[in-house]
């Protein structure tokens, strides 16, 4: 059997017949969302063949099968990043498993630095498009013509509209913009940030884009949210650190929770 088939077998033993409608990937510091869902089953990543080992603080490394607002969802409580082992496809089996379970769409969250002075730390940005600055793809080595994925609407207009409606209904100030993916793990230089601004980026981070590519390769529609945890390099005098990322992501967790619950009611 393939790793995905092995994963489905493990999942079926924990929650037979559970078919999630939506997949959700939680970024750094957002794990507390899971404290407010009705958990059907919890499975550690290391029990699922091919799932990543989350090696960064703020990522629990669990698959939760749960119900939120009457919607069955599969939550990836954490992710692995390209910079951890130099593999852009590190989330491939996880995304493929979500698709094989029956997920019809995906919501991705991350922590990001702001290139826009109006998007302050602690705010939330809806990603409308992205710029891949790494020169790599999780589809390197993939076979067949399916690897030539159309990315002209990587972020679903329909799902983005649903997220906007959820924000409006709850008086949440939802920023919008373009996300730039940098490989990390070091933070960007001020010169790199100036270059990204010139290219049109509004936020910068070290994740999400590989997952978006993998999801589109699987035919999954998706939307994505960035929790703004800091101003990018050169925009403030505050030194950048992962501890700062976790701190501001946690502060914004209530906003993200409210937004996601409202969004999931309509799915």
Image (cartoon, grey):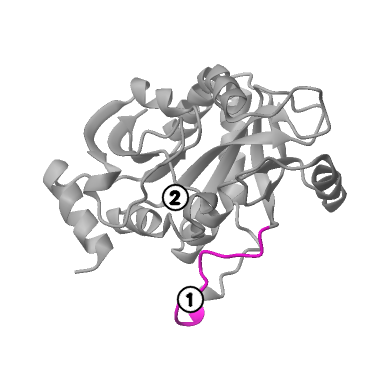
Quarter of the rendering containing residue 117: top right
The residue drawn where x is 35% and y is 58% is 93
Is residue 76 rendered to the left or right of residue 220?
A: left
**Looking at the magenta stretch, what is its main secondary structure?**
loop
Foreground residue, 103 or 58? Answer: 58
Which mark is in front, 1 or 2? 1
- Is residue 136 a member of the stretch shown in magenta? yes
- Residue at left 62%, top 47%? 184
Left or right: where 214 falls relative to 182: left
Q: Is residue 136 above or below residue 44?
A: below
In the foreground, 129 or 161? 129
Q: Which residues are magenta?
A: 134-145
Query: Is 202 left, or right, of 92 in this rendering?
Result: right
Identify the image quadrant of residue 187.
Answer: top right
* Residue 76 screen position, x and y as percent: 38, 41
In the displayed structure, does residue 226 sit left or right of residue 216?
right
Numbered badge on residue 105: 2
- As helix, strand or loop, the secondary structure at mark 2 comes to strand
Say above or below: 120 vs 189.
above
**Disc marking residue 141:** 1
Can residue 193 be seen by looking at this rendering?
A: yes
Q: Nearer the viewer, residue 192 or 105?
A: 192
């Amino acid at each position: 059997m393939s790793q995905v088939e092995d994963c489905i077998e493990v999942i079926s033993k924990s929650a037979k017949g559970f078919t999630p409608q939506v997949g959700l990937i939680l970024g750094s510091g957002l794990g507390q969302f899971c404290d407010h869902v009705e958990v059907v089953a919890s499975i550690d990543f290391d029990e699922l063949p091919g799932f990543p080992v989350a090696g960064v603080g703020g990522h629990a490394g669990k698959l939760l099968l749960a119900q939120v607002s009457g919607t069955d969802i599969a939550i990836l409580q954490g992710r692995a990043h390209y910079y951890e082992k130099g593999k852009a496809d590190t989330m491939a089996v996880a995304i493929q498993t979500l698709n094989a379970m029956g997920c019809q769409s995906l919501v991705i969250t991350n922590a990001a630095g702001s290139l826009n002075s109006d998007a302050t730390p602690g705010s939330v940005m809806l990603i409308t498009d992205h710029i891949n600055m790494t020169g790599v793809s999780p589809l390197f080595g993939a076979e067949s013509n399916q690897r030539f994925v159309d990315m002209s609407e990587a972020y679903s207009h329909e799902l983005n509209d649903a997220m906007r409606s959820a924000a409006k209904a709850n008086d949440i100030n939802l920023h919008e913009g373009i996300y730039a993916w940098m490989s990390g793990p070091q933070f960007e230089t001020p010169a790199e940030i100036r270059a990204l601004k010139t290219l049109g980026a509004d936020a910068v981070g070290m994740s999400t884009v590989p997952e978006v590519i993998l999801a589109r390769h699987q035919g999954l529609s998706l939307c994505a949210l960035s929790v703004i945890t800091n101003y990018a390099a050169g925009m403030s005098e505050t030194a950048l650190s992962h501890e700062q990322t976790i701190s501001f992501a946690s502060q914004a967790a209530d906003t993200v929770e409210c937004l996601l619950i409202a969004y999931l009611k309509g799915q």
